[in-house]
Image: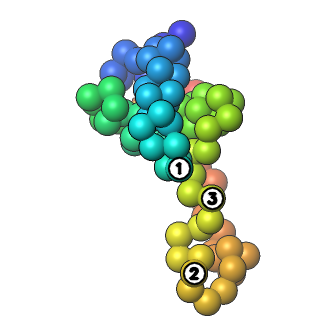
């Protein structure tokens, strides 16, 4: 299945890249950006990013840092402002 139509990347390519990234750095989350870089490309429209995160998450691989950035500063994640939820309309 093609996951990224801009770069014509399949779910198998994304999963293979995620596996390689985990093998190379088991403590680092596998972000969509890292997966793109591992495949020698970069996002164009960004429409596939959430799907890539979903695929990687389903593999049991963390897709974000375990703690929010700045967590060592005062406050907790609950103190952070809520980000807007973006929706894409079907084309
Ligand atoms: S669909 Fe992946 S960058 Fe556009």
Instruction: Give whichever of 29, 25 is nearer the camera.
Output: 25
Along the horizontal axis of the image, is 61 left or right of 43? right
Along the horizontal axis of the image, is 40 left or right of 56? left
Picture residue at 66% right of the left edge, 69% below the top: 82
Instruction: Pick out the residue farthest to the bottom.
Output: 74
Label disc, if present, on residue 27 of the rendered structure: 1
Colour style of the rendered protein structure: rainbow
Q: Secondary structure at mark 3?
A: loop
Residue 68 percent location from the top left of the image: 59, 67
**Residue position for label 3:** 66
CA distance separating discs 2 and 1: 18 Å
Dot 3: within a 10 Å radius of its alpha carbon, few (fewer than 14), some, or many (20 or more) residues? Answer: few
Instruction: Give whichever of 17, 7 is nearer the camera.
Output: 17
From the viewer's perspective, is residue 52 above or below residue 87?
Answer: above
CA distance separating discs 1 and 3: 10 Å
**Residue position for label 2:** 72
Picture residue at 50% right of the left edge, 36% below the top: 22
Instruction: Pick out the residue farthest to the top.
Output: 1
From the viewer's perspective, is residue 17 above or below residue 9?
Answer: below
């Amino acid at each position: 299945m093609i996951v990224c139509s801009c770069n014509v990347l399949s779910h198998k390519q994304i999963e293979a890249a995620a596996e390689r990234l985990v093998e190379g750095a088991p403590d680092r989350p596998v972000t969509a950006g890292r997966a793109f870089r591992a495949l020698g490309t970069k996002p164009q429209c960004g429409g596939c990013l959430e799907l890539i995160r979903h695929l990687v998450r389903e593999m049991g691989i963390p897709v974000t840092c375990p703690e929010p950035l700045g967590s060592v500063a005062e406050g907790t994640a609950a103190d952070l402002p809520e980000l807007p939820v973006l929706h894409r309309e079907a084309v």
